[in-house]
């Protein structure tokens, strides 16, 4: 048995000393780790070089959710962009899908035809105007939706009317 020294004690190699001790982990795999109540998974992996995966939400990329028919936003769309070709987008009521304040979704109209961005019972406000309610996103337009209050979203972008 190989012994190493740790904190002045001889310890068999590969043995975990204690869960409350300060330790350096080298070449270890953590399965479903929880740090300060947050869970890390493949979508939020930070590599040892300090870079974040391109497909991680909110960092180097805005992952795409491509749609070819009418689509209602889901919580999993937060931090992503929806590329839609037909059917339009519906922002669900906070009572049915409770996006957190600050949630951001980008919509790209990947067609020459205007797409509707509708809201159910909450408020959709066009940035910089007094306009509220359903908006149109012109062909090849790009819109950003940000939830600014419990039942209020703001929309801005090129081609929003």
Image (cartoon, rainbow, N blue to C red):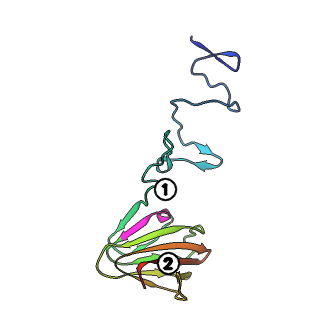
Kind of element beneath mark 1: loop
Q: Please determine whether, in this image, residue 108 is positioned above or below residue 131.
A: above
Residue identifier under label 1 = 59
Q: Position of residue 32 (x, y in %)?
A: 54, 43
| Residue 161: mark in rendering | none
Q: Position of residue 71 (x, y in %)?
A: 40, 73
**Residue 78 on the magenta span:** yes
Toward which corner of the image does residue 30 lie, by quadrant? top right
Furthest residue to the bottom?
A: 130
Q: Is residue 9 left or right of residue 4?
A: right
Q: Please determine whether, in this image, residue 22 is positioned above or below residue 139.
A: above
How far apart, in angstroms, are the residues tagged by discs 2 and 1? 21 Å
Q: What segment is highlighted magenta in the picture? A: 76-83
Residue identifier under label 2 = 155
Q: Residues within 10 Å of mark 1 (few under 14, many from 20)?
A: some
Furthest residue to the left?
A: 112
Residue under the point 48% across and 57% down: 57
Locate the C terminus and report the quarter of the image it occupies: bottom left
Kind of element beneath mark 2: strand
Q: Please determine whether, in this image, residue 148 is positioned above or below residue 48.
A: below
For marks 2 and 1 on the same chain, the one whose residue lies earlier in the sequence: 1
Q: Please determine whether, in this image, residue 160 is positioned above or below residue 71.
A: below
- Name the foreground residue: 97 vs 10: 10
Residue under the point 43% across and 57% down: 61
Residue under the point 54% across and 47% down: 40
Locate the N terminus and report the quarter of the image it occupies: top right
Asked if the residues shown at circle 2 and circle 1 are in contact, with their CB atoms under 8 angstroms apart, the answer is no
Q: Is residue 7 left or right of residue 3?
A: right
């Amino acid at each position: 048995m190989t012994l190493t020294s740790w904190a002045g004690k001889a310890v068999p190699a590969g043995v975990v000393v204690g869960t409350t001790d300060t330790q350096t982990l080298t070449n270890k795999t953590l399965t479903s780790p929880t740090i300060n109540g947050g869970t890390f998974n493949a979508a939020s992996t930070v590599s040892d070089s300090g870079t974040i995966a391109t497909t991680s939400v909110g960092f180097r990329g805005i992952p795409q959710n491509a749609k070819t028919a009418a689509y209602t936003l889901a919580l999993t769309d937060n931090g992503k962009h929806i590329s839609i070709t037909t059917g339009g987008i519906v922002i669900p009521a906070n009572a049915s899908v409770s996006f957190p304040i600050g949630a951001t979704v980008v919509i790209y109209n990947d067609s020459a035809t205007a797409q509707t961005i509708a809201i159910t019972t909450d408020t959709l406000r066009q940035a910089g105007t007094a306009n509220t309610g359903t908006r149109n996103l012109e062909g090849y337009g790009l819109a950003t939706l940000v939830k600014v209050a419990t039942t209020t979203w703001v929309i801005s972008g090129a081609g929003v009317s």
